[in-house]
Image: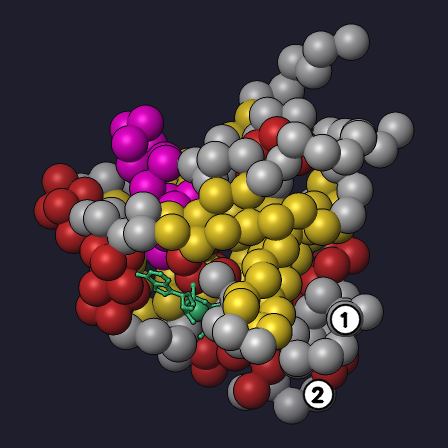
Amino acid sequence: MPSTINRVKTGIPGMDKLMEGGIPEGSVVLLSGGAGCGKTTFSCQFIMEGLDKGENCLYITLEESPEDIKKDALQFGWDLGKHESSGAFRIMYYDPFELKEIITRLKDLITVNKIKRLVIDSITLFGLYLKEEYNIRKELYHLVAALKETGCTALLLSEVTEGDSKKFSRYGVEEFVADGVIVLYYMGLGEGIFRNVEVRKMRRTKHKNGMFPLSLEKNGMKVEADMGSFNS
Ligand SMILES: Nc1ncnc2c1ncn2[C@@H]1O[C@H](COP(=O)(O)OP(=O)(O)OP(=O)(O)O)[C@@H](O)[C@H]1O
Ligand SMILES: [Mg+2]
């Protein structure tokens, strides 16, 4: 039976084929992976897709400066600055220490500016300032709950420690509270670089299981999605 829910296209060729045409609208998705595996690039491509469709988009960075993110995106030909000037795109730096404030301000920002797509790069940074794991979990739970009330589609980036393939998040709770989990893998073998992507979980949709080759080319990411079958 065809699905009637709205799909948010990632903008990454092949990626949406892994999940019946895109991320179910309003989902909060954890985008997880080791250092340098492409989380920021994936997110910029996702944002550009929204901007090209005329949607308002917001990028919260807790790590790199907004200028650096925009410069990185420009390398792929994505002119975020142009959309910032037109008012459709906002990129803001927050100190991870301000987590509680971010949660309250974010809801207003999203509602007032009619934001359709949000990226937080990365939620892992919050933990540096919240020492007690219990508090981190509690605040992350509040963050996801607040975002889900807004109806925007969000990517929360999560950096996992290299080699710990069983973990999708640093604090072990993010993958349960999020609606979806997309994992990026990176392996350097000799002179070759192998990148893969996996949809580990996506509520309200069927998705293909396992890893799919991901390439990073001069105009962005691309997924080879034609093999494999859907879960049921
Ligand atoms: N313009 C480009 N063309 C091709 N490959 C690129 C380009 N820019 C970055 N890369 C590749 O992408 C990798 C980093 O991608 P990205 O910054 O999206 O990863 P990340 O997961 O966000 O990393 P971090 O852990 O540093 O936040 C680089 O290590 C490089 O291999
Ligand atoms: Mg990054």
How many circles with numbers are drawn on the protein? Answer: 2
Q: Above or below — where is 121 with respect to 148?
A: below
User: Residue under circle 2?
Assistant: 132
- Viewer can see residue 188: yes
Nearest to viewer (mark 1 / mark 2): 1
- Between the C-alphas of marks 1 and 2, the distance is 24 Å
Q: Residue 41 carries which label?
A: none
The x and y percentages for residue 98 are 44, 76
Kindly identify the residue that appears in the image at 44 percent across and 48 percent down.
221
User: Mark 2 CB in 8 Å range of ligand 1?
Assistant: no
Q: Magenta stretch containing residue 136, yes or no?
A: no
Q: What stretch is highlighted in magenta?
A: 43-59
In x, y percent, where is residue 41? Answer: 41, 57
Which image quarter holds the N terminus?
top right
Label 1's element? loop
Task: Give residue 165's mark.
Answer: 1
- Identify which amino acid the numbered label 1 is placed on: Ser
Horizontal side of 68 relative to 202 (left or right) equals left
Amino acid under label 2?
Glu
Q: Earlier in the sequence, mark 1 or mark 2?
A: 2
Secondary structure, mark 2, is loop
Q: Note whether residue 145 is visible.
A: no
